[in-house]
Amino acid sequence: ETGVTQSPTHLIKTRGQQVTLRCSSQSGHNTVSWYQQALGQGPQFIFQYYREEENGRGNFPPRFSGLQFPNYSSELNVNALELDDSALYLCASSGGISGQETQYFGPGTRLLVL
Amino acid sequence: SQKIEQNSEALNIQEGKTATLTCNYTNYSPAYLQWYRQDPGRGPVFLLLIRENEKEKRKERLKVTFDTTLKQSLFHITASQPADSATYLCALSNSGGSNYKLTFGKGTLLTVNP
C-alpha cells in the first residue's frame, strides 16, 4: 500500500508568481484535503476534494484553487503569491468525507515566497 | 469564531513519567476530537479519535479524555520515552459530509528527557 506523496518537496518563488503543488493519495482513498501550516502553527484547512468535486473550503481567498483527477490525485494552485503564503503545504487523503475518517498526511511541500 | 487552545507551547518531562497535554476549545460543538503527532519536517500522523459521546479512549500507552461540558480534552502518554518527543496536535471535526472541516490547534512540543 503506497502512502500519500507530495511534490515538489521544496519550492522557492517570488511575489506575484503562480505555483502548482501536487499530491498522490493513498491507494483506495477518494478524498483529498489540503492544509497550510505556517511556522509554529497548526495546519489550517484550505479545502477538500471528494470524487473530483470541491467539498468544503476554509477561510482562504479564491487565488487558492484546486483540482482532483479521476485517479483521485490532486493539485493545489496558488496565484499572485504573497510573502505570507510561505508555509508548509500538507495534503491528506482519506477514505471518505465523514468527520471520523482518519486523515493520512503526506510529507508536505515547503514553499518560500521571496 | 472557533478557537482551539493547547495549554502550553512546550512541555518537558523525565523519561518514565506521564505526560499530560490539554486541548480547550470555544465556539464549537465538535462531533469528533482527534490527536495527531508531528515530527520536524514531516506531516502529522493520526493517533486517536474520540467521539462526542465518549468519555475516554485508550491505545497502548496513550489515553484521551473528552469533556464536552468543560470543552476540554486531555491527552496522556504513560511511561514516556525519549522517542515520544514530538509536537502533538489536537484537531476537532464536525460530522463531515458536505460541510466537512477539520480544525487544528497550534500544538504542544513535548520533550522527554532521558
Image (cartoon, rainbow, N blue to C red):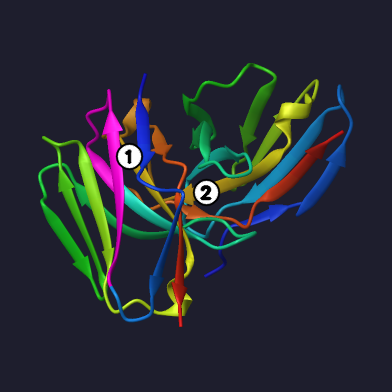
Q: Is residue B36 visible?
A: yes
What's the amino acid at mark 2? Ala
What is the number of the mark on residue A21?
none
Does residue B66 appear to the left or right of A78 in the view shown? left
The N terminus of chain B, quarter of image: top left
> What is the chain identity of the residue bearing mark 2?
A
Q: Which x, y percent locates residue A75?
A: 68, 38
Which dot marks residue B92?
A: 1
> Does the magenta stretch mainly form a helix, a strand or a loop?
strand
Residue B63 placement, left or right of B92: left
Eyeballing the image, is A103 above or below A61? below
Q: Residue at x 57, y 67 (%)?
A: A2
Would you call the spot at circle 2 few (<14 residues within 10 Å), some (14-19), or many (20 or more)? many
User: Which region is colored magenta?
Assistant: B18-33
* Quadrant of the rendered image containing residue A86: top right
Residue B4 lies in magenta, yes or no? no
Measuring from the top left, give residue A113's x and y in whole percent.
82, 34
Q: Chain under label 1?
A: B
Alpha-carbon span between mark 1 and mark 2: 15 Å
Query: Residue at the location (73% across, 41% down)?
Result: A21
Does residue A100 appear anywhere in the picture?
no
Disc 1 is placed on an element classified as: strand
Check whether the beta carbons of the residues at disc 1 and disc 2 lie within 8 A of each other: no
| Residue positioned 27% across, 23% down in the render | B27
Q: Nearer the viewer, residue B21 or B93?
A: B21
Residue carrying label 2: A92
Query: Is residue B81 positioned above or below A75 on the image?
Result: below
| Residue B32 pos. (x, y %) | 25, 42
Foreground residue among B80 and B34:
B80
Vertical arrangement, residue B82 with respect to residue A1, above or below: below
